[in-house]
Image (tube, rainbow, N blue to C red):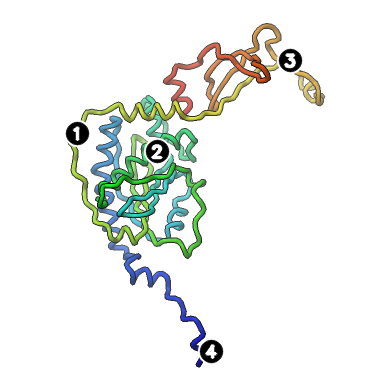
Amino acid sequence: MSQQSAQKTPAMDRTLFAKLTGNLGDQAKLAKLGTAFAQVYSEFLPDIIKSETGLEINIAYTGCQSGLMNELISRLGGNHALVNGSLRNWAPKFVLGCGSAFIMTLMEHMLGARPEDMEVAIARPLSVMELDLSVMVFEKIANVLRSAVNAPGGFEPYLDPPRNIEDHPAPLADSNDDFAAAITMTISLGKCVSEIIIIVPQRDLLRTVISAPRAKNPTAASQAWSEQLSEQVRRSQVTLDARIRLQSLTLDTISKLAVGDVIPFMDNTGDVRVEVSANSKDLYICEFGRSGENYTVRVKDNVNSDDELLRHLMN
């Protein structure tokens, strides 16, 4: 008997325990909450984007999936940007996601591309510049979330910097993972149809009372967001490449080049022409030179206007 009593009592099944403690809901309850969230987003997020950018978007509810938080994140696959967030008095952690194609398309619009000239964006991981710009997109998504859940105290949501899903922090051990729900909505802008996702622990979501925020008086389309986006672009770091043309050589000569051989510049008299580019787009015509111990280039001419340059960098 003493040996039997020394044996450990089997642990309760994790899923059963979560259901008994109110941390895991049934699909009907989750679908109801997901639909309520989508109704708030479809009513208010398009108005926010329209009033601040003049652009029209549409939101539609897709569904609500249940599972462990890390599992739900992994189901998104590639070509999503994610942010970890928290909102005091509601959820100490949640995840917001947005398809990269929407952010790419929005940036093209904001930088002056004509809708009739725009191709359907091919989803890919966002560049550093695009991630910088997506901060504002996630702020709008988070602000609608804050208004919908009406957390006591009126606190602002806290968001980490956006990351491509490939760079999202490695998941914790399953024992520390929460049962969560992923509320998915399509978001469309012109020809682009992408998605936004809200992933919330069910212990917080199931206790949420969702209410539509009070509508504000409509204002004229503002340039503030456009100016912010342009400012973000101008502050972003861009890698530049410089090309200097060399004298043409025969294939026979090239095949015999060895360490120490010298190939002259094409411009062997006067200033050496250098073409500077970023993201494979030509930006400036420069001349090659030297300042102290550093080789340099001096800008002589612009290839494009400022607006064209910004659009090129975003492509």
N-terminal label among 3 and 2: 2
Callout 1: SS: loop
Residue at x-position 55% and y-position 23%: 277
> What amino acid type is highlighted by mark number 4?
Gln
> What amino acid type is highlighted by mark number 1?
Pro
Residues under numbered marks 3 and 1 in contact, where contact means CB atoms less than 8 Å apart: no
Mark 2 neighbour class, 10 Å CA radius: few under 14, some 14 to 19, many 20 or more = some
Residue at x-position 54% and y-position 17%: 284
- Please state the horizontal and vertical placement of residue 152, each as a whole percent of the image: 25, 52
Q: What label does residue 264 carry, if any?
A: 3
Horizontal relation, residue 149 to residue 77: left or right = left
Where, by quadrant of the figure, is residue 300 drawn?
top right
Q: Which is closer to the viewer, label 3 or label 2?
A: 2
Callout 3: SS: loop
Distance (Cα) linking label 1 and label 4 = 74 Å
| 112 vs 15: above or below | above
Residue at image mark 2: 135
Distance (Cα) linking label 3 and label 4 = 88 Å
N-terminal label among 1 and 4: 4
Whether residue 179 appears in this view of the structure is yes
- Please, which residue is most extreme toward the bottom here? 1
Distance (Cα) linking label 3 and label 1 = 65 Å
Residue at image mark 4: 3
| 38 vs 7: above or below | above
> What amino acid type is highlighted by mark number 3?
Pro
Q: Which is closer to the viewer, label 3 or label 1?
A: 1
Residue at image mark 1: 218
Distance (Cα) linking label 4 and label 2 = 60 Å
Residue at x-position 54% and y-position 20%: 282
Residues under numbered marks 3 and 2 in contact, where contact means CB atoms less than 8 Å apart: no
